[in-house]
C-alpha cells in the first residue's frame, strides 16, 4: 500500500510542476502584451512599463519562474492587478464561501449518488427499475447550472421559500446560512449524482453475475444479506473512484453555480480575473484548483485501498 | 471492453462451462463479422437509441433550417424588449427586443457546429496520442504523461486557462472542448491497444511475419475504433456542458451571435422579471444533452455489449 | 473413498454407516424424475435439460458426465433451484429426503441450501468474495442458518483445518487473493461443508486446477465423504475423474441421460454407443500412441506410425438446435432410420446388472434403439478418415486427401503441384535428421519492466536455462503445470517474447533467429498453433482473409492464393465452402483446424502447438490429434507439442520433456520416460493423472503437497525440493537438494533427469 502510494508520487509531482509551468507561462503566451492588457486600455507607456516591472516580465524566464514558485511556496501569492490587493487576501476572503458550497455539495453527492445507485441496483420490480433509470438519464443530461436556474424559478420566484441570491456564512449563523447554501449545493450535487448512481447501479448489476454471489445463494444466504454484504460491498470501490473523479468537476461546477446564485466565492473571483486579465490572481487559482483535484484523486486511491484488500495488501 | 471476445455464454450462467466448444446454447452469438454498420444500426432499434436519434435528428434539422424558419435572423430588434410570450414571439423577446425562439434555434446551430467539429477532432487526436506507443515506447509513455497533466485540470478551469491565452469567442470554446476530451480518448485508445496487442490473432499475424503497420491497420485498429466512437457520443454531453458553462460565466461566444449558454447567461439576469427567457434555451440544451445520453446508452449496449 | 490414503478403519466406519442408512430408508437421498429445464431466448425455447432421471444414494458419489451443452451443469443448478434467468424448471420432481424441492417456498429452499445440500463451483478464483476474509465467508454459511458469531468462527477454524489448510489460525483472517487456486478450492469446500449437508453438488470442482492439485482436491473430497458420510453429486467432463471417484455414473448427451449404471459396470461394458465411443476416443496414459517410439534403440518401424485415435465425427449438438430422434444419431456409426425419428427411452438393461449393487443403485439403463435389441457395440475403429470431417458436412472430399499410408509418406500425386510439399525430413528417420529448431540455454525475463521501489530491475525468469531441439517429422512433447513456463518458452521461440539470453536456431542451416536475417527464416520455418480457438482468429476477417494474409507472407502471388487456400482448407478437413465464412460460424474444433491451416500456409518445418486440444471437448480432441498426426507424417513436420495432459502427450510424442518452474527436470524418449520416470516430479505427475478405468482405482498414488512456488523467488538448489516426496521434506539429511542445483544428466534408463536421487522413486503399477 505504502509502496503503491510512493509509486504515485512521481506522476503527481509531474502534474503539479507542469501545471505551475503552464500557469506561469500564461501571461507570456497570451497574444499581445500582457502588461498592456493588465494595465487597461487607457494606460500610458510609463504605466505599462511600471506594471511590466511589477509583474517581473523584464527578467529572464527561468529567474521569473523560480521567483514565482518560491513566492507560492512561502505564501507570497503576489498582487492582484485589478483589485490592487494581495492575492492571498482576496482568496482568504472568499475561500470560506467556496468551501461551504463544495463540502455541502460533496455530502449531498455522496449520499444521493450512492443511495440512489444502491436503490436502483437492488430494485427488483420493473416499475422501480424503470423509474430510477428514467430519472437517472434525465439528470445525466442536466447540467448543474440548468438545475440551478430551474430551482431559482420554482423555489425562488414561483414559490419563494428559499433565498436565491447572496449568502450568509454558515459559521456565523447556521440556520440562515444553511438556507442560503441549500439551493446552490443541491443544484451542484444532484445532477452530478446521477453519474455516480449509474456507476454504482451498473457495478452492482455486474457483481450480481459473479460466481461468489452464486456461492452465497448456495450457502443459503438471504437475498437482502447477499445484496448488502456481497453486492453493495463490492460495488463501493467504483463508487469511491467516481466520487474522487468528480471532485474536479465539482470545483468547476462551483464557479458557475456561484455566478448564478450570486455567491462571493473563488469562482466569481476567477471569472472576473479572467475577464480583466488579472494574471497574478488567475495563476494562483489555477494551480490551487489542480492541486486540490490531484490530492482528491490520491485520497480516492487511499479510500479504495481501505475498501479493497487486493489493493491494500497488493494482489 | 473489447467488442468481439468470446461473449458466447449459454443460457444464463447455467450452461456448461467446461470448455469453449462450438455449440453454445442460447441465442446465436452476435459477433461482428462483416457488418460493423449492422451493429451500429442495431443500436437504433433499441428504444433508447431510437428516441435519442430521433430527438437529435429533429434538433439538427431545426438548426440546419434556422435561416429558412426565421428569415429575419437572430438579430432583428424590431419589437419591444423583454416581452412575454405572444403569437408573434412564442417565447417572448429578449432585453434588446429580439425573438427568443429565433435566437434559441440559431444558438442551437452554434452549439451543434461546435460539437460536430470539436468532438470528432478531439477523438481523432486523442486516439492518435493514445496509440503513439506503437511508434516508440518512449513516445507512448510521454503522451500518457501529457494526458495526465491535462486530466489534472478540472474542465472549466482548463477552459478559463484557454480563454486567457486566446481570448473569448468561438475558438476558445472549440479548443476547450477539444483539449478536455483528449485524455479520455487517449487513455481509452491506449488501454484498447494494450489489450488488442495481446490478442492471439494479433500474435498469430506477428508470428507469420506480417508487418507491424499492417497488423495495426488490419487487426488492432478496428477493435479500438468502436469504444472510441461510443465514447465520443458520451463526450458530446460533456462538450455541451463545457460550452454552456463557459458561456454562462461570460467567457463564451461574443455577442450578438447567440449560443445556448450565452442566452442562459443573459437570461439568468432577468430570471425574476422574465422567467420564460431561459426556458427556451434551457429546454433545447436539455433535449440536446438528453438525445446524446440516450444514444450513447444504446450504443454502449449494442456495440460494446455492456 | 477409493483414493488411497484412506484409513481402513474410517472406510469401514463409512461402510457401516451406509449400511445402516440403507436399512433405515431404502429410498435414495436425492431422486430426480423427469426434470426439464428450459431457457427462453430470442431464438426460441431451448430445452437444456430434458426428462432427466437420476438418483443419489446416501454416502455415495454419483458422477454426471457429459460434454459442453449436455445439460449437466443446468441439471445441478436445477436441483439447487439456482438456474439463472431466463432459465426455468418446467417439469419434474426433485425429491430430496422425501420432499419435493420444487414445491418448497423460496424461504424453505433457502433453508435447504447450505444446510442440506451444498455446492462447490468450478472456478475457485471467482467463487470467493474478494473483500471478505475466508473466515467470515465460512462463518456466514453458519450464521445465516442460525449459529451465533462465536460458534461460527470456531467452527470455521475447525473446517479450515479439516480441509487441510496449513496454519489455519492465521489464514482464517486472510483474503481470498492471498490463497493459491488449490487452497481457494479447499476454502470453497469448507464453506460447502459448514452446514453439515447431506449432499454436496460439485460442479467440475477440479477442472480449473492443475493435475497435481486436482489429485489433492479429489483425495480431500474422498476423505471427507468417508469421514462425514456426505453424498456427492459430481459434475464433470472427465471420464478419468469419474472412474477414480464415482460409485455410479450418469452419462448425459444433448440434455438427456443416455446411459447410467454403477461405475465398474459402466467402464467394463457400455450400453450406449456414445459412452463406448467416448471412452475409446480418449488417449491413454498407459498405452503406446502414435509416436515413433524410437527411443531405447527401438526403430520407429517397429511401431506402426499414425495409428491414430478412434474419433467420433462431428460436434456435440447445440441445445438450441437438437437433431430429431436420438440426439447422437448424426455422429453414431450404428444409427438406423428409427434413431433419426424417434427419441429412445432410457430403459433398464437387465442383461448386464449382475455387477455388484447394480439393482440397489438404480441399475443399468441406456437410451438406444440398437443396443435395446441386444446388439453389441463394435469397437470404434481407428483411422476412419471421414470422421475428421466436421458435422453437417456429410461429403468431405478432403477426407481421402489427408489419408496416409502406413509408413507415413505421402503418395505422389495426392498433393497438387504448388501446394504444401512434404519436406525432405518427412520420410527420414525422425530424430536422426538435423534439428529444424534448436533452443540452447534459453532464459526469459517476463518482468522486464518491473523495477523495485528504488529503480533496480527486478527480473522474473519464467524460463531459466532451457535447451531442446525438434527435428522434422518428430514430436517433442513438453509437459508441465500452469506457471511452469512452457507457454513463455514457446512464445519466446517464435519471437513474441524476447529472450534474456540463450539462442534459438532454425532451419537446416541453423540460422540464429534473433538476428535480423534470422527472423525471416524463423517466420518461414516455425509456426504457432494457439490454445484458444476462439481467440486465435480475428472475428472480423473471413477464413479466406486469414489464410490470404498468411499466403501473402509466403510470397504467393494474388492470383494463386485462391487455389492455395482451397488446398489448405481441404488439407485440414474442411472444404472451400467454408472459406468465405467468418469465425463465429464455426465450432471450436473447426476453428482449431483453421488455425492450423493458417500456420501451414507458410510451409513451415516446425509447428509449435500450445495446448491445441485442451479447450476442446473430449470427442473433438481426438479429431484434432488425428489431424495433427496426419499432417506431421504427410509433411514431415516437427512438433513442439505443449500440453498438461500426459495422455495426449504420450499418444503423440516421440520424445518428451517435463518442465518445472522454468527448468526441464526430465527429458527422453517417450516410452522410457513414461515407463520408468526418473524424476520424482515426473512420477508424481503421472500418478496424479486420472485414468478412465475403474480397475486402476486402487493403484498407489503420489499426491504432492503444496503449490508451485513463484518464479519470482525460486527455491535454492533443486527447485522441486519444496514439494519433493524424496527430498529434504521427507529426508532432512538430504541437504544437497537445498545447496546444489541438480544438472540434467543421463540416467540408467536412457533419459536425462535433473535430480540428485534420480530413479529412487518408481511409479507403482497396479496395486
Image (tube, grey):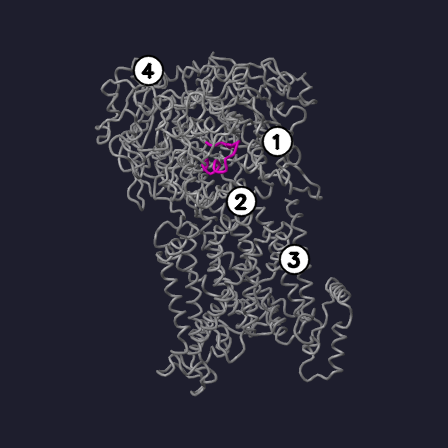
| Residue at mark 4 shares a chain with residue at mark 3 | no
What residue is shown at x 43% (from left), y 73% (from top)? A159
Corner quadrant of residue A135: bottom left
- Could you tell me if the residues under marks 1 and 2 are in contact, i.e. CB atoms within 8 Å? no
Q: Position of residue C103 (x, y in %)?
A: 28, 35
Cα distance, mark 4 to mark 1? 63 Å
Q: Magenta stretch: residue C610 in it?
A: yes
For disc 2, the marked residue is: B210
Q: Position of residue C609 (x, y in %)?
A: 50, 32
Q: Please report the bounds of the magenta region as a residue range.
A: C595-612
Residue C17 located left or right of residue C376 = right
Corner quadrant of residue B290: bottom left
Cα distance, mark 4 to mark 3? 76 Å
Which label number is shown at residue A15?
3
| Helix, strand or loop for disc 1 | loop
Above-or-below relation of C127 to C542: above
Cα distance, mark 2 to mark 4? 63 Å
Amino acid at each position: 500500500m505504502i509502496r503503491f502510494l510512493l509509486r504515485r508520487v512521481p506522476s503527481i509531482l509531474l502534474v503539479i510542476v507542469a501545471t505551475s509551468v503552464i500557469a506561469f507561462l500564461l501571461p507570456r503566451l497570451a497574444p499581445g502584451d500582457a502588461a498592456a492588457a493588465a494595465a487597461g486600455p487607457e494606460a500610458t507607456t510609463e504605466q505599462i512599463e511600471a506594471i511590466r516591472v511589477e509583474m517581473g516580465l523584464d527578467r529572464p524566464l527561468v529567474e521569473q519562474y523560480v521567483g514565482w514558485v518560491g513566492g507560492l511556496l512561502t505564501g507570497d501569492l503576489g498582487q492582484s492587478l485589478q483589485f490592487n490587493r494581495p492575492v492571498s487576501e482576496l482568496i482568504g476572503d472568499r475561500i470560506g464561501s467556496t468551501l461551504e458550497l463544495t463540502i455541502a455539495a460533496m455530502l449531498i453527492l455522496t449520499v444521493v449518488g450512492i443511495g440512489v445507485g444502491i436503490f436502483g441496483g437492488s430494485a427488483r420490480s420493473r416499475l422501480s427499475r424503470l423509474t430510477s433509470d428514467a430519472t437517472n438519464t434525465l439528470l445525466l443530461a442536466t447540467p448543474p447550472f440548468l438545475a440551478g436556474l430551474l430551482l431559482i424559478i420554482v423555489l425562488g420566484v414561483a414559490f419563494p421559500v428559499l433565498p436565491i441570491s447572496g449568502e450568509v456564512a454558515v459559521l456565523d449563523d447556521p440556520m440562515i446560512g444553511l438556507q442560503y447554501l441549500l439551493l446552490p449545493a443541491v443544484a451542484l450535487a444532484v445532477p452530478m449524482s446521477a453519474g455516480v448512481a449509474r456507476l454504482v447501479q451498473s457495478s452492482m448489476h455486474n457483481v450480481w453475475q459473479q460466481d461468489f454471489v452464486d456461492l452465497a445463494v448456495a450457502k443459503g444466504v438471504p437475498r437482502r444479506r447477499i445484496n448488502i454484504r456481497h453486492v453493495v460491498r463490492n460495488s463501493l470501490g467504483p463508487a469511491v473512484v467516481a466520487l474522487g473523479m468528480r471532485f474536479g468537476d465539482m470545483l468547476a461546477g462551483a464557479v458557475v453555480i456561484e455566478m448564478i446564485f450570486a455567491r462571493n466565492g473563488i469562482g466569481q473571483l476567477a471569472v472576473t480575473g479572467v475577464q480583466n486579465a488579472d494574471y497574478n490572481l488567475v495563476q494562483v487559482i489555477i494551480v490551487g484548483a489542480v492541486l486540490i483535484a490531484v490530492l482528491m484523486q490520491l485520497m480516492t486511491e487511499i479510500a479504495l485501498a481501505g475498501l479493497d484488500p487486493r489493493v491494500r495488501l497488493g494482489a | 471492453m473489447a467488442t468481439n471476445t468470446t461473449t458466447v455464454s449459454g443460457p444464463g450462467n447455467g450452461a456448461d462451462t467446461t470448455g469453449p466448444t462450438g455449440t453454445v446454447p442460447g441465442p446465436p452469438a452476435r459477433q461482428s463479422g462483416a457488418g460493423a454498420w449492422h451493429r451500429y444500426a442495431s443500436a437504433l432499434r433499441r428504444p433508447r437509441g431510437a428516441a435519442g436519434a430521433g430527438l437529435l435528428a429533429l434538433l439538427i434539422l431545426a438548426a440546419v433550417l434556422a435561416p429558412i424558419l426565421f428569415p429575419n435572423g437572430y438579430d432583428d430588434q424590431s419589437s419591444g424588449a423583454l416581452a412575454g410570450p405572444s403569437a408573434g414571439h412564442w417565447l417572448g423577446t429578449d432585453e434588446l427586443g429580439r425573438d427568443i425562439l429565433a435566437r434559441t434555434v440559431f444558438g442551437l446551430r452554434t452549439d451543434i457546429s461546435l460539437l460536430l467539429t470539436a468532438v470528432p477532432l478531439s477523438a481523432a487526436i486523442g486516439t492518435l496520442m493514445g496509440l503513439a506507443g506503437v511508434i516508440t515506447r518512449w513516445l507512448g509513455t510521454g503522451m500518457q504523461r501529457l494526458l495526465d497533466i491535462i486530466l489534472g485540470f478540472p474542465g472549466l478551469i482548463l477552459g478559463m486557462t484557454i480563454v486567457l491565452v486566446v481570448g473569448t469567442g468561438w475558438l476558445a470554446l472549440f479548443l476547450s472542448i477539444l483539449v478536455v476530451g483528449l485524455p479520455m480518448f487517449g487513455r481509452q485508445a491506449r488501454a484498447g491497444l494494450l489489450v488488442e496487442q495481446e490478442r492471439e490473432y494479433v500474435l498469430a499475424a506477428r508470428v507469420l511475419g506480417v508487418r507491424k503497420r499492417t497488423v495495426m491497420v488490419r487487426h488492432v485498429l478496428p477493435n479500438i475504433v468502436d469504444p472510441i466512437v461510443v465514447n465520443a457520443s458520451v463526450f458530446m454531453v460533456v462538450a455541451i456542458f463545457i460550452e454552456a458553462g463557459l458561456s454562462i460565466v461570460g467567457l463564451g461566444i461574443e455577442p450578438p451571435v447567440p449560443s445556448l449558454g450565452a442566452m442562459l447567461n443573459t437570461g439568468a439576469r432577468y430570471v425574476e422579471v422574465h422567467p420564460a427567457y431561459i426556458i427556451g434555451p434551457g429546454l433545447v440544451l436539455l433535449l440536446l444533452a438528453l438525445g446524446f445520453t440516450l444514444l450513447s446508452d444504446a450504443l454502449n449496449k449494442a456495440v460494446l455489449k455492456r | 473413498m477409493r483414493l488411497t490414503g484412506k484409513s481402513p478403519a474410517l472406510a469401514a466406519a463409512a461402510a457401516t454407516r451406509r449400511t445402516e442408512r440403507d436399512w433405515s430408508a431404502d429410498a435414495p437421498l436425492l431422486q430426480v424424475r423427469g426434470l426439464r429445464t428450459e431457457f427462453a431466448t430470442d431464438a426460441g425455447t431451448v430445452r437444456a435439460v430434458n426428462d432427466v432421471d437420476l438418483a443419489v444414494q446416501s454416502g455415495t458419489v454419483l458422477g454426471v458426465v457429459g460434454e459442453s451443452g449436455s445439460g449437466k451443469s443446468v441439471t445441478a443448478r436445477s436441483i439447487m433451484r439456482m438456474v439463472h434467468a431466463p432459465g426455468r424448471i418446467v417439469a419434474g420432481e426433485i425429491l430430496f429426503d422425501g420432499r419435493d424441492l420444487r414445491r418448497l417456498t423460496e424461504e424453505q429452499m433457502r433453508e435447504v441450501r447450505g444446510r442440506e445440500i451444498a455446492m462447490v463451483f468450478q472456478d475457485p478464483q471467482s467463487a470467493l468474495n474478494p473483500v471478505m476474509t475466508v473466515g467470515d465467508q465460512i462463518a456466514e454459511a453458519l450464521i445465516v442458518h442460525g449459529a451465533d458469531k462465536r460458534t461460527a468462527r470456531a467452527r470455521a477454524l475447525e473446517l479450515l483445518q479439516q480441509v487441510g489448510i496449513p496454519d489455519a489460525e492465521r489464514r482464517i483472517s486472510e483474503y481470498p487473493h492471498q490463497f493459491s487456486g488449490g487452497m481457494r478450492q479447499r476454502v470453497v469446500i469448507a464453506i460447502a461443508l459448514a452446514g453439515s449437508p447431506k449432499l454436496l453438488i460439485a460442479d467440475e470442482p477440479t477442472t480449473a486446477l492443475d493435475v497435481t492439485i486436482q489429485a489433492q482436491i479429489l483425495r480431500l473430497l474422498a476423505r471427507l465423504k468417508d469421514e462425514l458420510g456426505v453424498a456427492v453429486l459430481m459434475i464433470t467432463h472427465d471420464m478419468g475423474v469419474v472412474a477414480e471417484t464415482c460409485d455410479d455414473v450418469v452419462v448425459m448427451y444433448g440434455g438427456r441421460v443416455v446411459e447410467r449404471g454403477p461405475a465398474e459396470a459402466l467402464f467394463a461394458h457400455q450400453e450406449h454407443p456414445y459412452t463406448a465411443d467416448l471412452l475409446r476416443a480418449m488417449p491413454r496414459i498407459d498405452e503406446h500412441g502414435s509416436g515413433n517410439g524410437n527411443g531405447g534403440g527401438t526403430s520407429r518401424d517397429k511401431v506402426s506410425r499414425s495409428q491414430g485415435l478412434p474419433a467420433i465425427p462431428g460436434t456435440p449438438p447445440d441445445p438450441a438446435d437438437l437433431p430429431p430422434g436420438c440426439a447422437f444419431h448424426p455422429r453414431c456409426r450404428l444409427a438406423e432410420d428409427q434413431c433419426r425419428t424417434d427419441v429412445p427411452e432410457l430403459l433398464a438393461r437387465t442383461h448386464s446388472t449382475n455387477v455388484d449393487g447394480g439393482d440397489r443403485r438404480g441399475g443399468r439403463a441406456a437410451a438406444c434403439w440398437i443396443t435395446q435389441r441386444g446388439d453389441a457395440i463394435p469397437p470404434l475403429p481407428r483411422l476412419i478418415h471421414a470422421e475428421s470431417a466436421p458435422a453437417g458436412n456429410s461429403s468431405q472430399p478432403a477426407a481421402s486427401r489427408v489419408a496416409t499410408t502406413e509408413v507415413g509418406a505421402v503418395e505422389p500425386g495426392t498433393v497438387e503441384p504448388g501446394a504444401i510439399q512434404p519436406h525432405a525430413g518427412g520420410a527420414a528417420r525422425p530424430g536422426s535428421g538435423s534439428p529444424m529448431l534448436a533452443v540452447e540455454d534459453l532464459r526469459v525475463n517476463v518482468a522486464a519492466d518491473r523495477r523495485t521501489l528504488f529503480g533496480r530491475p527486478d527480473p522474473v525468469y519464467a524460463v531459466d536455462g532451457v535447451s531442446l531441439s525438434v527435428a522434422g517429422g518428430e514430436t517433442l512433447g513438453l509437459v508441465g503445470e500452469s506457471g511452469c513456463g512452457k507457454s513463455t518458452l514457446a512464445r519466446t521461440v517464435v519471437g513474441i517474447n524476447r529472450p534474456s539470453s540463450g539462442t534459438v536456431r532454425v532451419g537446416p542451416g541453423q540460422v540464429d533467429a534473433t538476428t535480423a536475417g534470422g527472423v525471416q527464416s524463423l517466420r518461414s520455418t516455425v509456426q504457432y498453433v494457439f490454445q484458444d480457438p476462439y481467440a486465435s482468429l480475428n472475428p472480423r476477417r473471413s477464413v479466406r482473409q486469414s489464410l490470404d494474409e498468411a499466403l501473402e507472407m509466403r510470397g504467393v502471388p494474388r492470383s494463386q492464393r485462391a487455389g492455395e487456400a482451397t488446398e489448405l482448407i481441404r488439407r485440414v478437413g474442411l472444404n472451400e465452402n467454408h472459406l468465405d465464412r467468418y469465425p463465429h460460424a464455426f465450432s471450436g474444433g473447426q476453428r482449431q483446424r483453421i488455425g492450423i491451416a493458417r500456420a501451414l500456409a507458410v510451409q513451415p518445418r516446425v509447428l509449435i502447438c500450445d495446448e491445441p486440444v485442451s479447450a476442446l471437448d473430449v470427442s473433438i480432441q481426438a479429431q484434432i490429434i488425428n489431424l495433427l498426426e496426419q499432417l506431421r507424417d504427410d509433411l514431415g513436420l516437427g512438433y513442439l507439442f505443449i500440453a498438461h495432459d500426459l495422455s495426449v502427450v504420450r499418444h503423440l510424442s516421440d520424445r518428451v520433456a517435463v518442465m518445472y518452474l522454468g527448468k526441464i527436470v526430465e527429458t527422453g524418449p517417450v516410452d522410457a520416460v513414461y515407463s520408468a520416470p526418473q524424476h520424482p516430479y515426473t512420477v508424481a505427475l503421472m500418478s496424479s493423472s486420472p485414468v478412465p478405468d475403474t480397475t486402476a482405482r486402487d493403484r498407489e498414488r503420489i499426491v504432492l503437497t503444496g503449490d508451485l512456488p513463484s518464479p519470482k523467488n525460486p527455491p535454492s538448489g533443486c527447485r522441486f525440493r519444496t514439494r519433493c516426496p524424496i527430498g529434504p521434506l521427507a529426508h532432512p539429511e538430504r541437504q544437497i537438494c537445498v545447496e546444489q542445483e541438480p544438472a540434467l544428466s543421463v540416467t540408467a534408463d536412457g533419459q536425462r533427469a535433473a535430480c540428485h536421487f534420480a530413479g529412487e522413486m518408481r511409479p507403482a503399477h497396479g496395486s
